[in-house]
Image (cartoon, rainbow, N blue to C red):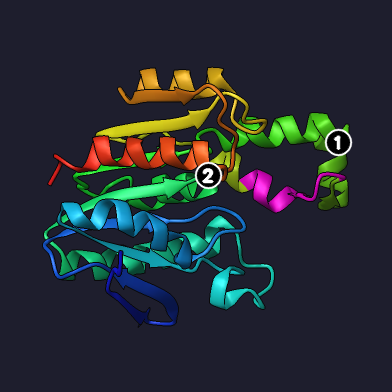
């Protein structure tokens, strides 16, 4: 399927609009290691239901991969607010589709927005717990992190005292958007207790894929995700 695509800049932020003109928008926020082009296969499954997709490259990703030291909430959140301001001036109804850490960034950025609905895939819902888990995996104490400020881990992530302080000072306490969540039962980063607790607190509908991982990438996983997207967007215009 040949989905129309228009590349734009929202101020300095590389972005792409997918699909034919519509009053209905699905704003796609990628996770770590992703980019705006991830919306291409997604567009083939949801644009036919009357949506356009707006996708962006977050700092250090996609067309911005040469950037450094800016994939953090104090850089990302102001950008997402710029993107939302743009979206509200061009579309009437806005849905959110976010992946992994893109979910956490989105909840911090859009907590006061009146979105039609949101769909979260492999979501980072409790960053405090995730970082605590990473500290346990690496045998790093809070005292040690405070002293060293930045610690590189054996699994490729970086622990940062500044980031940790930000997380403690900015808990997710408000999310009033109708939300549905998809996660994989084999996801090593997103534990089921956290997802269930969040879903109960904010009245979200939860779907768990038996053989799903954090990154939905196999044919079976992708087909499951696309079917889930169709079920939740096809009749929500």
Are the residues at dot 2 and dot 1 in contact (C-beta closer than 8 Å)?
A: no
Q: Is residue 157 magenta?
A: yes
State the residue at coordinates (40%, 63%). 40
Quadrant location of the N terminus?
Answer: bottom left
State the residue at coordinates (57%, 42%). 218
Q: What percent of the width, then of the height, locates residue 196?
A: 46, 18
Residue picked out by circle 1 = 138
For this view, does 51 lie left or right of residue 159?
A: left
Q: Is residue 77 magenta?
A: no
Residue picked out by circle 2 = 100
Instruction: Determine whether 62 is above or below 76 in the image.
Output: below
Magenta region = 154-165
Between 223 and 91, the residue placed more toward the observer is: 223
User: Which image quarter: residue 230?
Assistant: top left
Instruction: Determine whether 149 is above or below 223 in the image.
Output: below
Q: What percent of the width, then of the height, locates residue 190?
A: 59, 30
For this view, does 223 lie left or right of residue 136?
A: left
State the residue at coordinates (71%, 31%). 132
Q: What percent of the width, then of the height, locates residue 213?
A: 60, 34
Disc with the residue nearer the chain's start (2 vs 1): 2
User: Which image quarter: residue 4?
Assistant: bottom left
Between 133 and 123, the residue placed more toward the observer is: 123
Question: Badge 2 local density, few (<14 within 10 Å), some, or many (20+)?
Answer: many
State the residue at coordinates (30%, 34%). 179
Callout 1: SS? helix
Callout 2: SS? loop
């Amino acid at each position: 399927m040949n989905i129309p695509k228009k590349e734009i800049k929202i101020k300095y932020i590389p972005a792409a609009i997918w699909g034919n003109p519509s009053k209905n928008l699905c704003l796609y926020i990628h996770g770590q290691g992703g980019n705006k082009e991830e919306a291409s296969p997604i567009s083939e499954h949801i644009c036919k239901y009357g949506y356009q997709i707006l996708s962006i490259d977050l700092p250090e990703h996609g067309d911005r991969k040469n950037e450094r030291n800016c994939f953090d909430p104090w850089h990302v959140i102001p950008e997402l607010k710029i993107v939302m301001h743009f979206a509200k001036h061009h579309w009437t109804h806005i849905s959110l589709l976010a992946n992994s850490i893109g979910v956490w960034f989105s909840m911090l950025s859009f907590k006061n927005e009146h979105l039609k609905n949101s769909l979260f895939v492999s979501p980072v819902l409790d960053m405090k717990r995730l970082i605590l888990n990473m500290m346990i995996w690496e045998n790093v104490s809070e005292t040690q992190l405070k002293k060293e400020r930045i610690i590189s881990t054996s699994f490729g992530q970086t622990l940062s005292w500044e980031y940790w302080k930000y997380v403690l000072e900015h808990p997710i306490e408000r999310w009033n958007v109708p939300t549905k969540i998809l996660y994989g039962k084999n996801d090593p980063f997103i534990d089921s207790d956290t997802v269930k607790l969040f879903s109960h607190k904010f009245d979200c509908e939860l779907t768990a894929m038996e053989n799903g991982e954090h990154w939905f990438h196999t044919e079976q996983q992708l087909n499951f995700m696309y079917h889930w997207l169709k079920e939740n967007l096809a009749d929500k215009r």
